[in-house]
Amino acid sequence: MTHVPPPPAPPPPPGPPVDPGPAAGGPAAVPVCPRHPDRVSYVRCQRCGRPTCPDCQRPAAVGIQCVDCVAQAARTAPQVRTAFGGRLRDGRPVVTLVLIALCVGSYGLQWLVPGWTGRWAFAPVVGAAEPWRFLTAAFLHSPTSILHLAFNMVALWAVGPFLEQSLGRARYLLLYGLSAVGSSVAVLLLATPTDSWFTPVVGASGAVFGLFGAVLVVLRRLGRSARGIVGVLVVNLVLGFVVPSISWQGHLGGLVTGAAVGAALAYAPRARRRAVAVATGVGTLVVLVVAAVVTYAAVGLV
């Protein structure tokens, strides 16, 4: 007899798909932002390929980059420098604005806080015991004349941003501080101990004159005309000798100090700009301190 195989069993009826489970691969993981794991993001950085949420996305030349890649690119990108080594920055002149804010804020405190002016103003007779006054006087102005503050702040805004951009923030601040101290030292050296040493001196004009002196040097280094600055300097120096309430000594001291420091910074070799800036700051401060100490020693105050 011939064996006949039974007919094949019918296929099972269609039903719901069977979940293959993790062993068969499982569902794909939902992409989340590395910085914000609670946020789902299907947009990926064109540079590193990681998901990036809207808060971490930065527009790039092509596509989107994450904030980490943008920061890394900024750190590794070559910095654009000015002719004097200052970092070329976009935006506001931060240091100049801070200096103006300090002067304006201090002017308000002169009105609101009793004794504020006398606490920080410079007078040669008290400079030996309280040497910080050599600097702090540059942030005070005559409480009875808001024009004193206004003129100095306008002059600071006229030349400050240019020098801040050209020299860089740190060297610009060094220039301003040394010019302020140099102005007070000149008052000490040129005033009469028996009379003018007891007269308090306030105002940012000495430091501003230092900036004008530095601008003269910087413009000359760039081969540009400085006739406008020279005219302003001549007029203000003459006023210092004509108007009794203006300290020509402070103006002259700030101008000389600023021009000297500005020349050192502007003509420094490119490879040694930082070293020259440090040496200039230390050397100028030492000269000013020695001049003050010798003067005080001559009258027996040290």
Image (tube, rainbow, N blue to C red):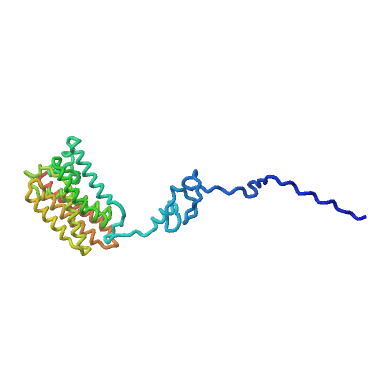
Is 146 rendered above or below residue 50?
above
Residue 237 visible in the displayed image: yes
User: In the depicted view, which residue is nearer to us: 290 or 163?
Assistant: 163
Foreground residue, 286 or 80? 80
The image quadrant of residue 263 is: bottom left
Question: Would residue 97 appear left or right of 197 to someone viewing this image?
Answer: right
Please report the residue visible at 42 percent of the width from the left and 52 percent of the height from the top: 58
**Residue 43 locus on image (x, y percent):** 49, 51
Compared to 252, does 301 lie above or below? above
Image quadrant holding the N terminus, namely: bottom right
Q: Nearer the viewer, residue 197 or 173?
A: 173
Q: Is residue 9 left or right of residue 204?
A: right
* Residue at x 65%, y 48% (from the top left corner): 23
Residue drawn at x 20%, y 39% is: 108
Q: How many marks?
A: 0
Q: Residue lying farthest top?
A: 114
Horizontal arrangement in the rendering, residue 192 relative to residue 55 (left or right): left
Residue sitting at the far bottom: 223
Name which residue lies at 15% across and 51% down.
291
Query: Do we see residue 302 in this rendering?
Result: no
Tell me residue 106's x, y (percent). Answer: 21, 41
Quadrant containing the C terminus in the rendered view: top left
The image position of residue 201, as x and y in percent, is: 13, 44
Furthest residue toward right? 1
Rendered location of residue 199, percent (x, y): 10, 42
Using the image as rendered, state which of residue 17 and residue 177 is in the foreground.
17
The quadrant where residue 165 appears: bottom left
